[in-house]
Image: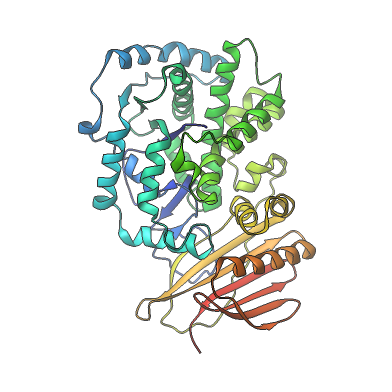
């Protein structure tokens, strides 16, 4: 099992990052364009880091939760210059300024996160995130996002780099024989930060939720590759000469499950895969760029950021600049009392997870790569306490769109307790489900769904 680091800013502005792989939310800009006339109160990237980042962002500023300096901490931090020198030799990126480091206990992380959930996180934001995850069937209807996020991050966190304070932290429970590996990963973030300004890099990607996750995969993937190369060189080997080793390492990380991390291993598929994605697929993406561009590939991924998780999963689409499309959302002509609540997009990553969860791994493997673009939007009538999901996804051919139409119909039937079909044709199906009326349609290469129609 991998132990994950947490990359986060120490200050919270109007752009906030929330729990679990890249849940980014901005309060100024919509992350998608389902309708030019809509002004979202908030927009969301359905990923894995919304609450966690804003909470951990405050850790570095909270000195009471930090461990007291110990001999082990001083000894470990004394290795920073030597490890940084090796990483510079590998990447060409120089450590321009010293990077302070300190230890922190997992108990203090857990305590502080719980406190911040109650003090600093808007309950409505958490509720909206849960709503979207539940409506798409990514998590159970009784899932508690905030509590589960705290437990998951506490269990998984090995270290984190604060790119505003320019400081790294390592948990005291990190085994001594892996501490230099963890340091190498965090120092890789520091090198990238000093060369390419990570806070700005993240900020520039906030207009696209899928693109935000792709940028996270760049940062974590590069750090994972450099860490792995650091370890390989210590063993007299190199990933540059053995690309199959990279694929093997990524596969081992994805498929590991020793029982040592029960919170992670019992988490919903969506949370597990989204947490692992930036490290494993990001590492493979970085390796592909390095195979093409050599050492310049470390800088190229920051100079020209990937714009989708599809480009991370398929580097050839990054090289060819294949960008996502922007399918139009269905218009169900809802009453004026329904207002835009939250909007965004699901990338190839989420569609892979959705298909695996409801149609199986084989279908996900075969169909998800044909994804071309997606938008979704939740609209809410607060007085009536009702919400409607609008969803549109485009595929690269009518045949693949029809396959997804059939797969999504089955997904609706599986994730709802009540699924009553009132009308069905080759290209549409409508009826009633758990949240109200629904209408699923196929139009050429685009599949649309409206879920939660009010009673008529």
For the point 56% across and 66% down, the residue is: 415
In the picture, measured across the screen, residue 12 lies left or right of residue 286, that is left
For the point 37% across and 58% down, the residue is: 126
- Quarter of the image where one finds residue 298: top right
Task: Kindly tell me whether residue 442 is visible in this rendering.
Answer: yes
For the point 46% across and 28% down, the residue is: 189
Residue 352, percent from left and from top: 64, 52
Query: How is the model colour-coded?
Result: rainbow
- Quarter of the image where one finds residue 359: bottom right
Residue 1, percent from left and from top: 52, 32
Residue 276, percent from left and from top: 54, 40
| Residue nearest the viewer, comparing 335 with 257 | 257
Q: As displayed, is residue 131 above or below residue 65?
A: below
- Quarter of the image where one finds residue 398: bottom right
Can you name the residue that lies furthest to the right here?
Answer: 399
Q: How many marks?
A: 0
């Amino acid at each position: 099992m991998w132990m994950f680091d947490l990359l986060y800013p120490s200050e919270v502005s109007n752009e906030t990052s929330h729990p679990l792989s890249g849940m980014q939310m901005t309060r100024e800009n919509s992350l998608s364009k389902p309708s030019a006339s809509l002004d979202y109160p908030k927009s969301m990237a359905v990923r894995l880091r919304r609450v966690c980042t804003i909470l951990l962002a405050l850790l570095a500023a909270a000195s009471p939760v930090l461990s007291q300096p110990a001999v082990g901490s001083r000894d470990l931090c004394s290795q920073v210059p030597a490890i940084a020198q090796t990483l510079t030799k590998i990447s060409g990126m120089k450590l321009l300024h010293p990077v302070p480091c300190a230890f922190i206990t997992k108990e203090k992380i857990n305590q502080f996160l719980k406190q911040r959930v109650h003090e600093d996180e808007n309950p409505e934001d958490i509720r909206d995130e849960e709503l979207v995850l539940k409506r798409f069937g990514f998590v159970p209807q009784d899932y508690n996002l905030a509590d589960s996020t705290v437990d998951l991050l506490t269990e998984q966190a090995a270290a984190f780099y604060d790119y505003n304070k320019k400081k790294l932290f390592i948990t005291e429970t990190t085994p001594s024989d892996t501490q230099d590996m963890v340091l190498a990963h965090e120092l890789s973030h520091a090198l990238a930060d000093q060369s390419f300004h990570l806070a700005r890099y993240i900020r520039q990607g906030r207009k696209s939720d899928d693109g935000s996750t792709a940028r996270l995969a760049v940062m974590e993937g590069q750090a994972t590759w450099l860490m792995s190369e650091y370890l390989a060189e210590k063993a007299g080997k190199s990933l540059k000469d053995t690309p199959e080793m990279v694929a093997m390492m990524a596969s081992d990380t994805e498929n590991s499950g020793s029982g040592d991390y029960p919170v992670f291993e019992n988490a919903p598929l969506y949370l597990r895969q989204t947490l692992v994605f930036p490290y494993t697929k990001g590492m493979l993406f970085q390796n592909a760029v390095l195979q093409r561009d050599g050492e310049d590939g470390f800088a190229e991924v920051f100079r020209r950021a990937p714009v989708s998780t599809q480009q991370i999963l398929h580097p050839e689409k990054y090289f060819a600049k294949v960008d996502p499309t922007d399918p139009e959302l269905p218009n169900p002509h809802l009453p004026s009392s329904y207002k835009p609540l939250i909007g965004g997009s699901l990338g190839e990553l989420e569609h892979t997870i959705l298909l695996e969860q409801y149609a199986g791994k084989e279908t996900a493997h075969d169909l998800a790569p044909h994804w071309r673009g997606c938008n979704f939007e939740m609209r809410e009538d607060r007085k009536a306490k009702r919400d409607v999901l609008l969803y549109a996804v485009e595929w690269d051919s009518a045949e693949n769109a029809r396959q997804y139409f059939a797969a999504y119909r089955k997904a609706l039937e599986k994730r709802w307790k009540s699924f009553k079909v009132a009308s069905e044709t080759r290209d549409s199906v409508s009826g009633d489900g758990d949240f109200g009326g629904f209408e699923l349609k196929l139009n050429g290469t685009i599949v649309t769904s409206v879920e939660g129609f009010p009673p008529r």
